[in-house]
Image (cartoon, helix red, strand yellow):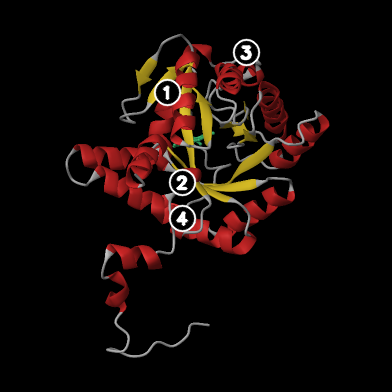
């Protein structure tokens, strides 16, 4: 129930906006470095930081450079990073066996970071698209993205990540039943403390374009992901997916993309009260970078405003490529 307000002039809403001190006092939401998960891209080689043209300022790093980035993240106070592997067309296969290879670049990076920067939490990506010859998140049989056989592979992938030392498993594949299957496998293998942050409400979005360049999936992808990722026109279905994944053992849930789906974030938080994350995806990042490179918007202010929007919408945290830049700004402000 909303208490009634006195009419003007007894109520002047500008009174509480009159100075920085008063604005700070009445401010409802705050953004801190604790809110960030930083997605980074790993590739093979050594000493490599390879720019991604559609994501200015973001690079693919060899494992040694990923460790340096992890150190940087921890020094900035960023609590977690999320590792995505780049795989060239030549290394992609139909059986996706690279996905659960203990020696794949992602698993090598996890072990190296755990050794060098143990205080940093490591999140992973569970989906076949970064290894699949056709760029899909599950196996393709006669043109169909099959569910149950894909889940078996995803379980193997998740287990290999947990073995490597991952703290948070991030299934981004949108197959049915994978959260329960992964949870059961983790429990069975003695990984009781490994968390699952489910990409529960993930939409079939054109905002993922630059990410697919980053992981080498753009050239590989045949068709679209609409039979497993959500229709952008739906919102009730998002709640059913979140409810299902929580019931199967997800510790945290995610809405993806971010800014265009803040209504979903709010509904999810209000309905379930579970730890709720949003992914400010590659296309969102690219738009802000492009517009500010043209001098059309103020980069830092738009970056911080966009991140605050997630807090206002009820999110507990944000996966964002801006994490280090935003962390630096926040640190400057507090000194
Ligand atoms: C794939 C995956 C995608 C993203 C994260 N994991 C792309 C997709 O579903 O095609 C997108 C992230 C971004 O755009 O920043 N499983």
Location of residue 106 (image quadrant): top right
State the CA–CA distance, disc 2 to disc 3. Answer: 30 Å
Query: Which labelled disc corresponds to residue 257?
Result: 2
Marks 3 and 1 close (CB-CB < 8 Å): no
Question: Which residue: 78% across, 32% down?
Answer: 185
**Label 2 lies in ligand 1 vicinity (Cβ under 8 Å):** yes
Along the polypeptide, which appears first: circle 4 or circle 3? 3
State the CA–CA distance, disc 1 to disc 4. Answer: 35 Å
The residue that mark 3 highlights is 103
Query: Which labelled disc corresponds to residue 311?
Result: 4
Question: Where residue 163 sits in the image (x, y, percent)?
Answer: 70, 23
Closer to the camera in the image, 323 or 172 = 323
- Secondary element under disc 3, as helix, strand or loop, is loop
Instruction: Tell me if I can see residue 15 in this picture.
Output: yes
Q: Residues within 10 Å of mark 3 (few under 14, many from 20)?
A: some
- Secondary element under disc 1, as helix, strand or loop, is loop
- Secondary element under disc 2, as helix, strand or loop, is loop
């Amino acid at each position: 129930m909303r208490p009634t307000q006195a009419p003007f002039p007894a109520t002047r809403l500008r009174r509480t906006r009159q100075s920085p001190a008063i604005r700070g006092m009445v401010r409802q939401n705050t953004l801190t470095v604790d809110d960030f998960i930083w997605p980074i891209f790993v590739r093979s080689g050594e000493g490599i930081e390879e720019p991604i043209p559609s994501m200015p300022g973001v690079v693919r790093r060899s494992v040694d450079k990923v460790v340096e980035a992890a150190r940087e993240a921890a020094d900035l106070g960023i609590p977690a990073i999320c590792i995505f592997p780049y795989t060239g067309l030549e290394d992609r296969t139909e059986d996706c066996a690279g996905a659960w290879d203990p020696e794949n670049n992602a698993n090598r990076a996890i072990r190296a970071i755990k050794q060098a920067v143990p205080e940093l939490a490591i999140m992973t990506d569970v989906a076949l698209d970064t290894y699949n010859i056709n760029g899909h998140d599950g196996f393709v049989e006669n043109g169909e993205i099959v569910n149950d056989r894909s889940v078996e592979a995803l379980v193997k992938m998740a287990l290999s990540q947990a073995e490597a030392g991952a703290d948070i498993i991030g299934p981004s594949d949108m197959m049915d039943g994978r959260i329960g299957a992964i949870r059961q496998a983790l429990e069975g293998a003695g990984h009781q403390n490994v968390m699952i942050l489910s990409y529960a409400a993930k939409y079939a979005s054109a905002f993922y374009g630059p990410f697919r360049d980053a992981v080498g999936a753009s050239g590989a992808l045949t068709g679209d992901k609409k039979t497993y990722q959500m229709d952008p026109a739906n919102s009730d279905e998002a709640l059913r997916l979140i409810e299902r994944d929580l019931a199967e053992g997800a510790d945290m849930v995610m809405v993806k993309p971010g800014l265009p789906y803040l209504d979903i974030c709010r509904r999810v938080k209000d309905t379930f009260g579970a730890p709720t994350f949003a992914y400010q995806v590659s296309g969102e990042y690219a738009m802000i970078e492009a517009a500010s490179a043209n001098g059309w918007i103020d980069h830092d202010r738009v970056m911080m405003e966009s991140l605050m929007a997630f807090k206002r919408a009820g999110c507990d945290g944000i996966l964002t490529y801006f994490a280090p830049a935003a962390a630096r700004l926040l640190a400057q402000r507090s000194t």
